[in-house]
Image: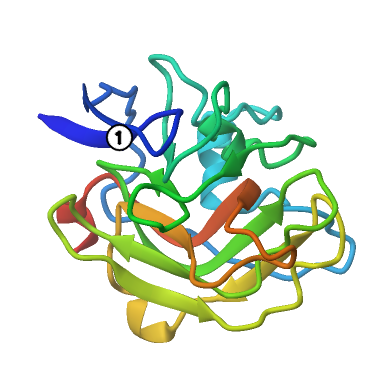
Amino acid sequence: EAVRRRVMGEGLVMTLPKLHRHMSLIVAEGKKFKFVPKPETKGLGDEGIIHFLGTDQGKSTSYVNPAMPGPLAEVAVSYSAAKENTKPFLSLDNYGSVKSLALPGSDGMTWVEFDLSPRCVCPEHYSLKHYDREGYYIRTWVLEARGRDTDSWTIISEHKDEKSMATGPNCVMTWPIDRKYHRTPFTTFRVRLKEKNSQGTWHLGISGFELYGSLYNSMADGL
């Protein structure tokens, strides 16, 4: 099987063999990750699905980016387009201070995609972390999701003229996802700009992403 994956360059696209990622079983009936706001928690916290995958399913106290290229990668991250030497996996750095920008692709859209397949998530909340620069804050965007590569994208969260992400470098915000999707399994999530950022460009700088909800080993388990 092959997938079309964006690579570094002027929206260049090439077809690569799908990575055979290390996938250990979690629980077929689903593991629930609930978002609980805590006044003392800064950043992304440690109770989400991405953190769970980045800590060897909770067995380690140290977070390792689960999209780091290699045989143990748990998530694949891709950009609509990017400058040379950009590393899309840094969008799951989550706890450091990194710079990684997605640019408009050949279709004019700017997005960052997170592929957890074959695992799936029935989402209830999600978090975003701005990259390590002042400005270029996203204001109008959507979170889209799909279960299979052949499925159309479904908008599961929509933001219009949102100002909450304009509080400084590495700022983090969390939003609820419409309840009608809480029992719908998705393998892939995509943050897509609908309008220009606060600086009037189509740059999208994300250095952290988190999901809350139920995690399953496969779409069959999540249905």
Quadrant in which the C terminus is drawn:
bottom left
Please give the name of the residue rendered at 64% of the width and 37% of the height, measured from the top-left corner.
Answer: 100
- Is residue 149 in view from this perspective? yes
**Residue annotated with mark 1:** 5
The quadrant of the rendering that contains the N terminus is top left
x and y percentages locating residue 196 in the rendered image: 60, 67
Task: Pick the residue in front: 77 or 215.
Answer: 77
Circle 1: element type: strand
x, y percentage for residue 48? 58, 53
Q: Nearer the viewer, residue 157 or 135?
A: 135
Q: Position of residue 120 (x, y in %)?
A: 31, 52
Direction from residue 20 to residue 57 in the image, left or right: right
* Residue 197 position by quadrant: bottom right
Q: Which quadrant holds residue 42?
A: bottom right
x then y, percent, for residue 32 = 46, 60
Q: Amino acid at mark 1?
A: Arg
Residue 145 quadrant: bottom left
Badge 1: residue crowd in 10 Å (few <14, some 14–19, many ≥20): some
- Check the image and report above or below for 71 versus 60: above
Q: Nearer the viewer, residue 164 or 60?
A: 164
Q: Residue at x 57, y 21 (%)?
A: 85
Nearest to the observer: residue 29 or residue 37: 37
State whether residue 182 appears in this view.
no
